[in-house]
Image: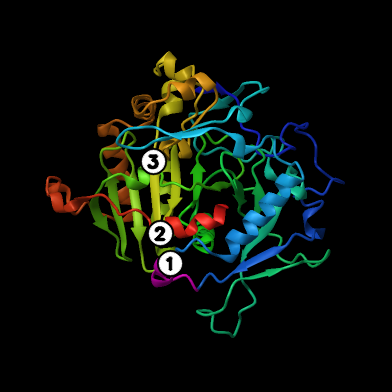
Amino acid sequence: MLTIKRVPTVVSNYQEESSESTGCGRNCLGNCCLPNSSLPLYEFNQDRVSRDNRRRNRSGFSFLNNLLLEQWRERMNRGLFRYDVSACETKVLSGQCGFIAQLNEGRHLKKRPTEFRVDQVLQPFDPNKFNFTKVGQEEVLFRFQPSTRFNGKDVTTAETRIFEISNGEFGDLSTNVVAINVSPIEYGHVLLIPRVLDCFPQRIDNESLLLALHMAAEAASPFFRLGYNSLGAFATINHLHFQAYYLAKPFPVEKAPIRRITMSVNGVMISQLLDYPVRGLVFEGGNTLRDLADVVARCCIRLQSDNVPYNVLVSDCGNRIFVFPQCYAEKQALGEVKQELLDTQVNPAVWEISGHIVLKRKEDLEGASEDYARRLLAEVSLSEKRFEEVKACVFKACGLQEEYKDNVEDKELVFSPPTTPHYAEACVVLQ
């Protein structure tokens, strides 16, 4: 059994309470309180997001953005966060990739290391450990549900709606909630928790990934990305959740060149990252969000069943997904990571792998460089041989073949994707 000791991130103000606390009487997200709650309901039209709509709607202006940021600021004014993330120093490191380094001492101070098992990607849900049913409802911004109110109507044109729900009108108990992360990395840092009362362990399936893509599409902002960490890849809470936040810069991985590999029958293009420290796959396109979600979910399900830790970045308003198999925690448990990297106590999860590196010590920020970022992320990446083995298993699970394998030198298959449009226009969202 492989384990590592790390300081867990506190994502809720209730996380450090007794693990035996049920939350009854304090307005939590458990069965005791949630059915009688009055949390606002955000309904989206899950049939309206075609590929053409997704391409058009990337302006950064959306009802979800306004709602999320307004509610997030309100929680900030109420003092629910552990520190002021806007005061965290951030700089772009000079170099080819343009890695982004942030000093965020608040996510680390006054916490004790905890031992985590890192050799099992799939672990059963344990109700005795902290999970999101123990979160107080004041940390929840709204529920996020596909609409059931458009029956008999033209669902291709029906709009998103927000409803204020009275006590006793909760409806479907398999609800998805959006809550703040009380230890934010960036502005608007939230958690998307699918079907919170079902207490799913941290494992992706088709429906949960599709929900994350819908949230990205509804946000319609190039600044808004969602991330996922599997167990063994620096997830510390074994209760299904995604993270998301706004960053007003392109992630370095979004600018990395890629090589097209193949295309699925439903129009999803699969590519491989080039000239980036972490090997990974890129999925984009598809006729609908479900097409894209289904292909990526099959990839993730295979990684889970093969016990390969991985991270996922949802980018470009849900149009582009990066999947990174990784091995840093395994190397750390085996004593194969250099001490100079361990001393920084950086946990390379999805944000760090994508190029937004969260540092915990001022001296590390002052000495940060692209060379350091590349050395750190090189320890995360699978070897070329292991990556090819994993890729072959994933392609088999997805019913895909590597169409361009014999043409890797063909420069027409190697390109750097253009910067996501509308960055300047979307700046107003963060002001």
Residue 257, how many percent across, how many down?
Answer: 26, 46
Give the CA separation, mark 1 to mark 2.
7 Å
Residue 411, how many percent across, how many down?
Answer: 14, 49
Residues shaded magenta: 48-57
Residue 42, how many percent across, how many down?
Answer: 65, 65
Indicate the secondary structure of the residue bearing disc 2. loop
Instruction: Return the disc, 1 or 2, that comes first in the chain's sequence.
Output: 1
Residue 4 horizontal side relative to residue 198, left or right: left
Give the CA separation, mark 3 to mark 1.
24 Å
Residue 25, how many percent across, how many down?
Answer: 87, 46
Secondary structure mostly seen in the magenta stretch: helix
Residue 167 horizontal side relative to residue 387, left or right: right
Residue 10 lies, with reference to residue 110, above or below; the image says: below
Instruction: Return the disc, 2 or 3, that comes first in the chain's sequence.
Output: 2
Indicate the secondary structure of the residue bearing disc 1. helix
Label 1 crowd bin: few (<14), some (14–19), many (20+), radius 10 Å: many
Query: What amino acid is labelled 3 in the image?
Result: Phe
The residue singled out by tag 2 in the image is 319
The residue singled out by tag 3 in the image is 324
The residue singled out by tag 1 in the image is 54
Foreground pick, 380 / 392: 380
Label 2 crowd bin: few (<14), some (14–19), many (20+), radius 10 Å: many
Q: From this viewpoint, is residue 281 visible? A: yes
Give the CA separation, mark 2 to mark 3.
17 Å
Residue under the image location 57 percent in, 38 percent down:
185
Residue 128 horizontal side relative to residue 295, left or right: right
Foreground pick, 188 / 267: 188
